[in-house]
Image (cartoon, rainbow, N blue to C red):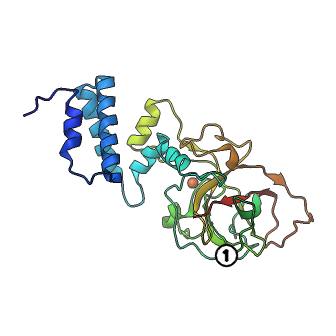
Amino acid sequence: MQSLNQFTLTEAVKESFKTEEGSRLKFLLETFIEHLHDYTRETNLTHQEWMGVLNFLYDCGKISTPERHEFILLSDVLGFSALVDMINTRGGATEGSNLGPFYLDDAPVKNLGDDLATGREGVIVMAKGTVRDILGKPLAGAIIDTWQADATGTYPIQEQERGQDKYDLRGKFTTNERGEYWYTTVLPKPYTVPYDGPVGDLLRAGNRHAWRAAHLHFIIRAAGYRDITTEVFFANTDYIDNDAVFGVRKSLIAALKPVKKGQDLGVSVQRQPDAMFEFEFVLAPE
Ligand SMILES: [Fe+2]
């Protein structure tokens, strides 16, 4: 039997897994074990600290529900989610950003020019732009699947007990023959990620806040192209430089411009906007 010590242990653990030679699983597992062991040796982790980590993970599991996934939140505040988004962004395509916890895959189908914020107060903005491929070709029939918080920073899905419809402030638009999209909605406000659980304790321990910069969520799809999950932010708004989940990229910040009464918008809309922004989504081939 091999005599194990703190340096030979790592290889022994790797070899104990009989995974397929050359497989992705083997690579992921072995790399994880190496880094975890390296971290442990490098930090001289104590029993107390080790148990602290395990109890923290236990608490994350305990507070999680189908609606509240504390591990996703942990991934977000550690920049792990942002890193996965960054690594998986294709050159030339729109940068990816957080999916967040509130996506529904069956949002109502909308027509170009519709208002997503029917009956809601706030700053009404027109979103307008095109979907193109990385060579600049407009993509007709692309799907713009969007969802967002309201003018108080709340998602309607969070307020169903107070009579809100979970399908409010979300919709699927299809680009026209020139790859264009436009609609109106209410300008969302910043909101905090949940900070009443273990991840909140972690934020407090690090003297960090829980605020997200105001944003609109998007998934853009077109046949033959790679889907993009991303967010659009607004220039000069709160937390744009210190979003709690590291979702902001410079290329995802849109400039809001005021819209004057009677101004020719070039397209027809259901509701008169107070402001507008333009944003181009770029998709890479599959
Ligand atoms: Fe969000």
Residue 169 horizontal side relative to residue 105, left or right: right
Q: Quadrant of residue 170?
A: bottom right
> Does 82 appear above or below 161?
above
Q: Split into 4 quadrants, where in the image is the N terminus? A: top left
**Foreground: 69 or 42?**
42
**Residue for point 28% across, 45% down:** 58
**Residue for point 53% across, 43% down:** 245
Residue 267 x %, y %: 84, 71
**Foreground: 142 or 198?**
142
Type of the residue with mark 1: Lys
The residue singled out by tag 1 in the image is: 110
**Residue for point 90% across, 59% down:** 260
Identity of the residue furthest to the left in this view: 1
Residue 125 x %, y %: 76, 60
Q: Is residue 260 visible?
A: yes
Residue 39 x %, y %: 33, 30
Categorize mark 1 by other alpha carbons within 10 Å: few (<14), some (14-19), many (20+).
some
Q: Split into 4 quadrants, where in the image is the C terminus? A: bottom right
